[in-house]
Amino acid sequence: MLMDKSRLAQLKEEMREAAQSLGIDKIGIASADPFTELKNRLIRHRELGRESGFEEPDLDKRTNPALLFDQPQSIIAIAVAYPAKLPNPPKSEPGARRGILSRSAWGEDYHKVLRDRLARLEAWLKERVPEARVESMVDTGALSDRAVAERAGIGWSAKNCSILSEDLGSWIYLGEMITNIPFEPDTPVTEGCGECTKCIDACPTDALVGPGQLDSQRCISFVTQTKGFVSDELMRKIGNRLYGCDTCQTVCPVNRGKNWTHQPELQPDPEVVKPLLVPLLTIGNREFKERYGHTSSAWRGKKPIQRNAVIGLGNFKDKSAVPDLIGVLKEDSRPVLRGTAAWALGRIGGEEAMEGLRKALPDESDEEARVYLERAIASLEAGLNGAEEGAPIPRES
Ligand code: B12
Ligand code: SF4
Ligand code: SF4
């Protein structure tokens, strides 16, 4: 592409100035060179079994922009900031317990919002450089959004794994656009965590096995997005999280006081993001789509969220939920829901729960769900509320 250096520098400056009006909170340029160090890191990550399985499996594509785009010249990285505080949060009370969606799932699905911002940026660029070619991606693309953002100076790669920006914090979604425009790359931000280890110390499952190193299989955010049975240990640690986990970000001092309310599509409806748990147990497909279909929490369907609602009720030890949980145990067609309801009843305890469990046992045909039922009964018989002991419950395969 024929463009002299001063024109390129001017265009870059104009683009930075236009960002806010395009709905973009931060913009930076990364070179399109291969991410060689990242590749080694990803190989090691895989060898250690720490992947979630949601990543693009082809590590060459993940780390070499030239395999995704003909002669890439630079990558434009963007960040869009999202809210961290719920206005007038509804109370979670005995008899009316609530679960919570992570902040990354508040408001409109961020894939849609960032694609919109990238489309606006593309139109802006093409107006000025008609021969520009671009390829945009958000989350589901092959590239590591965090590695691109880090290289483009959006923020540093923090100990909680997030891209953390001094001014925006880590409450930012990331996206990028590979281009044939040879913009001058920006300088990466120097690591700013210092001696702090608050996120590592606060992680409920010790999933942060080191600074910037995550064992995804233990990360609650990942676990809430699985569809199968969950181990007793992890169910206890899920607490009332219905989707995702924010703990390693809420404890971060850089995030203190940061709450971004200027992106209209990303503002939460408190009743949607902090919903009552009991109604979720029997929510129909149509209602689920209406309430959650527009959020990023819906991508795995309603089953994980319903399973997590059952787990939440168990963790609250909410006796008033026992009849509803017995309803799931008796009537839900999905073994994971029945088995998890048995676990929740075992955790809550009491005569009514025990009776429900005993009555359901002879009819339980699924082998794994039966294990949960038997274990819940055994623990209540032993006077242990909530299977305090016992062999590990089978994990999702
Ligand atoms: C798979 C995935 C997950 C998995 C695994 C997360 C992980 N940390 O690996 C699960 C389901 C657990 C997950 C959870 C979350 N995710 Co996620 N996820 C992704 C996805 C699709 C790929 C991430 C990946 O490849 N990880 C593998 C690791 C090894 O690589 P990486 O993090 O991409 O790259 C960094 C490391 O390699 C590191 N690194 C490189 N070399 C070396 C060397 C050493 C020695 C060390 C220590 C590190 C290091 O630096 C790179 C840049 O930071 C990206 C989107 C994308 N396409 O990139 C979103 C993405 C990372 N997720 C995002 C979000 C918001 C989350 C959650 C906060 C959601 C929530 N509230 O529940 C949590 C945070 C969990 C956490 N502590 O990381 C955002 C992050 C935004 C930000 N500000 O950083 C992304 C970028 C989506 C987006 N487009 O906005 N996620
Ligand atoms: S998202 Fe939650 S479980 Fe995962 S690393 Fe952060 S604090 Fe730990
Ligand atoms: S809590 Fe501390 S160590 Fe963790 S990301 Fe924030 S500043 Fe870094």
Image: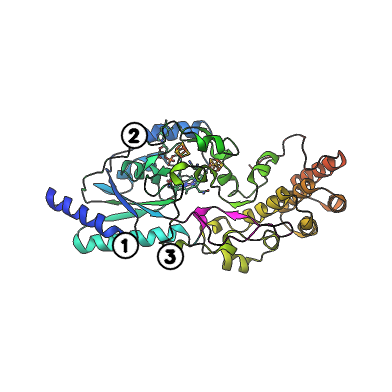
Using the rendered image of the protein, determine whether residue 4 is visible from the camera's viewpoint.
Answer: no
Q: Which segment did they paint magenta?
A: 82-106
Q: Is residue 288 above or below residue 225?
A: below
Between discs 2 and 1, the one toward the N terminus: 1
Answer few, some or many: residues within 10 Å of disc 1's Cα (few below 14, many 20 plus, some between 14 and 19). some
User: To which residue does mark 3 refer?
Assistant: 264
Q: Magenta includes 207? A: no
User: To which residue does mark 1 refer?
Assistant: 22
Residue 36, which numbered label? 2
Q: Quadrant of residue 33?
A: top left
Element marked by disc 3: helix
- Residue drawn 54% across and 52% down? 102
Please name whichever residue, 357 or 62, is drawn nearer the observer in this view of the structure: 357
Residue 369 on image: x %, y %? 76, 47
Separation (CA) of disc 2 from disc 3 = 38 Å
Using the rendered image of the protein, determine whether residue 210 is visible from the camera's viewpoint.
Answer: yes
Q: Tell me the mark number nearer the camera, choosing from 2 and 1.
A: 1
Residue type at tag 3? Pro
Q: Tell me the mark number nearer the camera, choosing from 2 and 3.
A: 3
Residue type at tag 2? Thr
Residue type at tag 1? Leu
Element marked by disc 1: helix
Separation (CA) of disc 1 from disc 3 = 13 Å
Please name whichever residue, 11 or 332, is drawn nearer the observer in this view of the structure: 11
Answer left or right for 61 relative to 327: left
Q: Magenta includes 88? A: yes
Answer few, some or many: residues within 10 Å of disc 3's Cα (few below 14, many 20 plus, some between 14 and 19). few
